[in-house]
Image: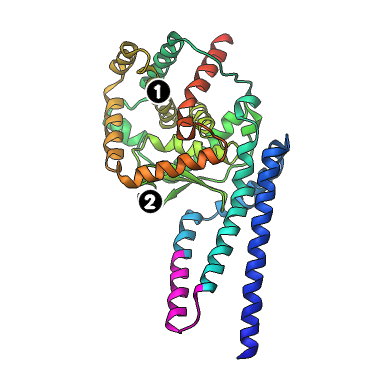
Amino acid sequence: MIRDAKKREKREKRYTVVAWICLILALLFQVIARRVPGFADWYAHHIYPLIVGSVGRVFGWVPFSVSEFGIYVIVVVGAGWLIGQIRAGKPWWMRFLRRVWLIVAMLFFLYTMNCGINYHARAFSEYAGIETGRYTTEELADLCEFLTEKVNENAPVSEADREENFVYRERAWQKEGIRAMQAVGERYPELAGFYPRAKQVTVSEILSVQQLSGIYSPFTVEANYNKAMTDYNIPHTICHELSHLKGFMREDEANFIACLACSFSEERAFRYSGYLLGWIHATNALVDVDRDAYQKCVSKLGTEVKRDLAENNQFWDRYDTKTAKVANQINDTYLKANLQEDGVKSYGRVVDLMLAYRKLEKSGE
């Protein structure tokens, strides 16, 4: 018994040491990424791709979201261990706290190495030569009219067309997401190379109640998306989450990259998704400065497009709860902690990138 107690004590001490090592290393790399110029860029585009090509590749072979089921395993195993300790009458409180401390420290280390450092790397727009600036209302209206045309051009034309080409197909859309990202990677080398497939979250209600369409898991290097959403959201979300696997963590840029990648796809469902999500961002900006121009764009939308937008609003309205507001506040705090000072507002800055890209494309015509 004394020998067992000593072994248990040594094991508990090792847990504490490992936890402190993980915490110290994570904090050290966080400071270096924020204070040493060029380090985050070098890491995001030289070291991080190795992690994606190894860890991401291994977990990519698993047909389900490892991060999602990892949560379930931790909860079930943790609860089972705790119940067993209490029933056995063992002193469990300090041992429980040590294990929680170890898990938190390890997850913080994984988050830092697989995500946190990348937040401080250069923006995709700098690599792509897309310079944002000040734009007129006329330029914004022109962008919205262009997107309206593209949305209608790629939208479903009938119920049969919708069933054949626009209804969510798990494996086919996961593969097309990779092809779309690799297609845009031929133009922008920073997006080229290997991608593990994105994974649908089996219990997507977890994301829906938080009003999340997708999430990147730095612990397993997985791109996860909400399969319960209105179908047109899914292609854009797949490409959005995959863009994080190239080291681009800013949400505004991930949205822009997703719109761009979808436009490079050979599948109408993907082009429709990218253009429609871009249309929503752009017209949300337009309505604040020129309501007449906004109404003009809305009036031009096809019947099937309006149907999709209505169904999408109905879906998310079901989850407009206090839980969603708390989740939104947590997300806002998380973004600001990673120096995205606009918080969740950074999702709207994708319009500046679309305007800059539109101007760049028109100048090359």
For this rendering, which residue is in front, 78 or 297? 78
Residue 101 magenta = no
Q: Residues within 10 Å of mark 2 (few under 14, many from 20)?
A: few
Q: Residue at x 44, y 31 (%)?
A: 270
Q: Are marks 2 and 1 in contact (CB under 8 Å)?
A: no
Residue 116: x %, y % from top left? 60, 44
**Residue indicated by mark 1:** 279
For this rendering, which residue is in front, 264 or 242? 242
Q: Residue at x 65, y 48 (%)?
A: 51
Residue at mark 2 to residue at mark 1: CA–CA distance: 27 Å
Residue 206 numbered tag: 2
**Which quadrant holds residue 232?**
top left
Q: Amino acid at mark 1?
A: Trp
For mark 2, give the secondary structure. Answer: helix
**Which quadrant holds residue 167?**
top left
- State whether residue 117 is above or below residue 294: below
Residue 198: x %, y % from top left? 50, 45
